[in-house]
Amino acid sequence: MRELLRVATAGSVDDGKSTLIGRLLFDTKSLFSDQLAAVERTSRERGDGYVDLALLTDGLRAEREQGITIDVAYRYFATPKRSFILADTPGHVQYTRNMVTGASTADLALLLVDARKGVLQQTRRHAFLASLLRVPHLVLCVNKMDLVDFDEGVFERIKDDFRAFVAKLEIVDVATIPISALGGDNLVSRSPSTPWYEGTSLLHHLEELHIASDRNLIDVRFPVQWVVRPRTDELHDYRGYAGQVAGGVLKPGDEVIVLPSGLTSRIAAIDTYDGPVAEAFPPMSVTVRLEDDLDVSRGDMIARPANQPAVGQDIDLMVCWMVDAPLRPRARLAIKHTTRSVRSVIKNIAYRVDVDTLHRDDSVAELRLNDIGRVTVRTTAPLCFDPYRRNRTTGSVLLIDEATGATVGAGMLL
């Protein structure tokens, strides 16, 4: 089974994100003939002098008419070495929430800049968001190098400018690649137009990037999603707990604790669709059987007795607010955390982050659409959680409007 890499693209308007994804799909032969034919037909109808591969991801009519990306578009492709999910996120400031959505599960953020414009305010904004969301790897693609005659000096200036900014952020792995998405330079193979560039092509970087160590393999975290009780004669006494491993390595014989009850037992076996396994690790979906009959239900967390998550009801969050109606203290919201859902009330808003300057504004009384700020919530039942910087799965929540069921915010636990 090929390893999966999740990639989120970001950047300012007209930096070429959709064209980049379209070119990758085209050059890796991941397109069906009817898809390519439809893009060629639309390009002719619009009077383009070339096949606009951006149309492969800009699927909404408003996107095609304006030549911008509005919604998050997901595209899938694979090479012999790895499978990929590419999230094309919008570049406009008013769609910051969409960028947060696309990057929340990404292993790598692909940030584009126009070689003619250099690092812009929106470039810094998206780099900060990638840092806030703990995306472990970042690639800066200096696009449209063909429009600056593949000038090495232009590339180096942009590279130095960007690295000076990200030095303030918590991003440990940053690569910079000069490309031309329209012409395919340095995308799938090295381009003869950049003899001064000594790095690899973008696809080679994506294929060879090591991501296994990005996952938390130390802290055992297993949120129970479903209690498996087959009603068959052969499995009459079977009781298992199904879910996705969120952290650590589970093995038969390991002593575990079930939270929030505090009951302990040992793992009797770990089952999968293909049969029992000797160990389970993120992001495997498995069924865990315990040696003792305990009261375990959906929303409980299985961990190790000597390495437990925090358990609490007063919780501090960094929140990205996603709807027009502002978030104010005393607002009542539902919270979805791993497989557990609870009700909550907003106790206070500590500050709002100015994404452009990274300064904190502690005078705000509310968070508005696309704002990011620190809030404290009180939940009706305890949550078993880790700081987001330690575990992106057990450290994140969704804020939900109780009346409509709509997701109104994304939170990262501190």
Image (cartoon, rainbow, N blue to C red):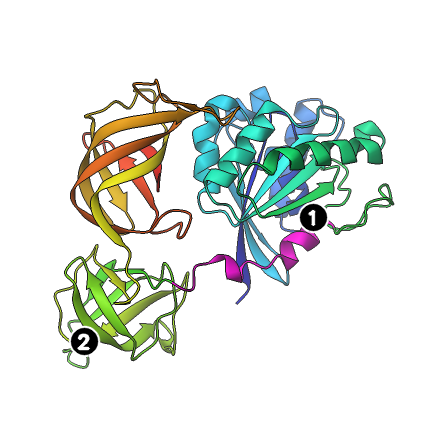
Q: Which residues are magenta?
A: 201-218
Q: Quadrant of the C terminus?
A: top left
User: Residue 101: percent from the left, percent from the top?
Assistant: 43, 38
Q: Is residue 312 left or right of residue 81?
A: left
Which residue lies at the image location 54% right of the left edge and 29% below the top edge? 125
Most foreground residue, 163 or 333: 163
Q: Amino acid at mark 1?
A: Leu
Q: Is residue 316 left or right of residue 140?
A: left
Number of other residues with Cα within 10 Å of mark 2, as a class: few under 14, some 14 to 19, many 20 or more: few
Number of other residues with Cα within 10 Å of mark 1, as a class: few under 14, some 14 to 19, many 20 or more: many
Most foreground residue, 75 or 136: 136
Q: Secondary structure at mark 1?
A: helix
Q: Which mark is residue 89?
A: none
User: Residue 391: percent from the left, percent from the top?
Assistant: 39, 52
The residue labelled by disc 1 is 202
Q: Amino acid at mark 2?
A: Tyr
> CA separation, marks 1 and 2?
49 Å
Above or below, 88 relative to 15: below
Which residue lies at the image location 15% right of the left edge and 80% below the top edge? 233
Task: Look at the numbered discs 1 and 2 and tell me whether their residues touch, using CB distance below 8 Å.
Answer: no
Above or below, 383 relative to 377: below
The residue labelled by disc 2 is 238
User: Residue 188: percent from the left, percent from the top?
Assistant: 73, 50
Figure quadrant of residue 299? bottom left
Marks 1 and 2: which is nearer the front?
Answer: 1
User: Residue 192: percent from the left, percent from the top?
Assistant: 87, 45
Residue 204 is one of the magenta-drawn residues:
yes
Q: Tell me how many marks there are.
A: 2
In the rendered structure, which disc, 1 or 2, sits on the residue that comes first in sequence?
1
